[in-house]
Image (tube, rainbow, N blue to C red):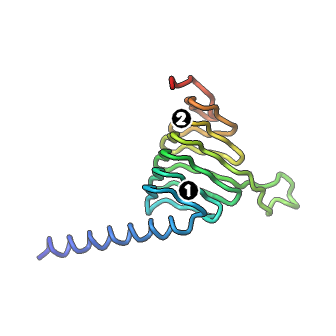
Amino acid sequence: MRQLIFRGIDKFVKWHQDYRSAKLIKELHSCGARTWVSPDARIWGTDRVTLEDDVAIHAFTHIFGGGGVHIGARTQISTGCSIAAITHSEQIATRHHGIELPVTIEEDCWLGTGAIVLPGVRIGRGSIIGAGAVVTKDVPALSIAVGVPARIVRQIAP
């Protein structure tokens, strides 16, 4: 009897997670085929976020899409990442107004656990961002960037 109850609870939890993921995906500006978004990921400004085919966004990732976020095909975003496309002015009088700066992550990229991508950044095709890196400026295609702030440590053979 106990096992039956636990199986029922597990099925309900799975259904609820699938429902939350599907609802989030429907709210996006555009979403490609076979895209997976963890039910534990959070996306604000969904109407400005575009995901291409085969994108995976794992748990506890936060995307602040107010300025526009584009994530290319076959990109993997690990657990606990943060992508922000909005910032604020240094001036006290206007600090409460958001400044929108789009973020573009091109196809075939991989963001390691806890990576942070700041507003206005473009990450080039096939690049890898190391775990915990803070990307403050553009990363060229086929590069590996690590550290705080992120710096290019080497190129990837195509």
Furthest toward the left, the residue is 1
Say whether residue 4 is left or right of residue 149.
left
Residue 126 bears which disc, if any?
A: 2
Image quadrant where residue 66 sits:
bottom right
Q: Is residue 95 above or below residue 115?
A: below
Q: Nearer the viewer, residue 113 or 111?
A: 111
Residue located 64% across and 46% down the image: 104
Residue 18 in the image, given as x and y percentages of width and height:
38, 67
Residue 155 bears which disc, if any?
A: none
Mark 1 = which residue? Answer: 62
Instruction: Indicate the amino acid at tag 1.
Output: His
Q: Judging from the image, what secondary structure is the residue with disc 2 in?
A: loop
Residue 67 in the image, given as x and y percentages of width and height:
71, 57
Say whether residue 96 is left or right of residue 114.
right
Residue 27 in the image, given as x and y percentages of width and height:
56, 68
Name the front one of labels 2 and 1: 2
Instruction: Indicate the amino acid at tag 2.
Output: Gly
